[in-house]
Amino acid sequence: MSTQALISAVHYRRDYPGHDEGVVLVWQGEAYGWKNELRDPQSERPGVYAVDADGNVWEAVGGNDYDGAERWEAMQ
């Protein structure tokens, strides 16, 4: 899934100029938002991916859909 997250993030950055830094947020293969830095996992549901401008990918894990994720984990 992280490959699809990377592709979605590239398209998001292309479609929304000015989001060259920070992380693009991806849920079920669709980019839906952007943050200036990787932060606040509790505001995302588990399974969300965050992709930075260098292609690094993190997944929101732990927690639940109501309370949000517990942390970000780097994908290998």
Image (cartoon, rainbow, N blue to C red):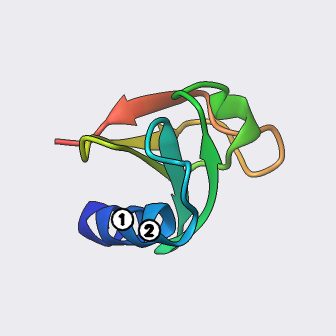
39 sits left or right of 7 in the view: right
Report the residue at 64% width, 37% height from top: 69
On-image quarter of the C terminus: top left
Question: Residue reaching furthest right?
Answer: 66
Under circle 1, the secondary element is helix
Q: Quadrant of residue 70?
A: top right
Give residue 10's mark. 1
| Residue 14 badge | 2
Residue 47 can be seen, yes or no: no
User: Depth check: 17 or 33 in front?
Assistant: 17
Label 1 is placed on what type of residue? Val
Residue 14 percent coordinates (x, y): 44, 68
Quarter of the image where one finds residue 63: top right
User: Tag 2, which secondary structure?
Assistant: helix
- Give the amino acid type for the residue marked by disc 2 in the picture: Arg
Residue ID at (51%, 51%): 24
Q: Quadrant of the N terminus?
A: bottom left
* Looking at the image, residue 3 lies above or below residue 45: below
- Residue 18 visible in the picture: yes
**Residue 8 point in image, percent of width and height:** 41, 71
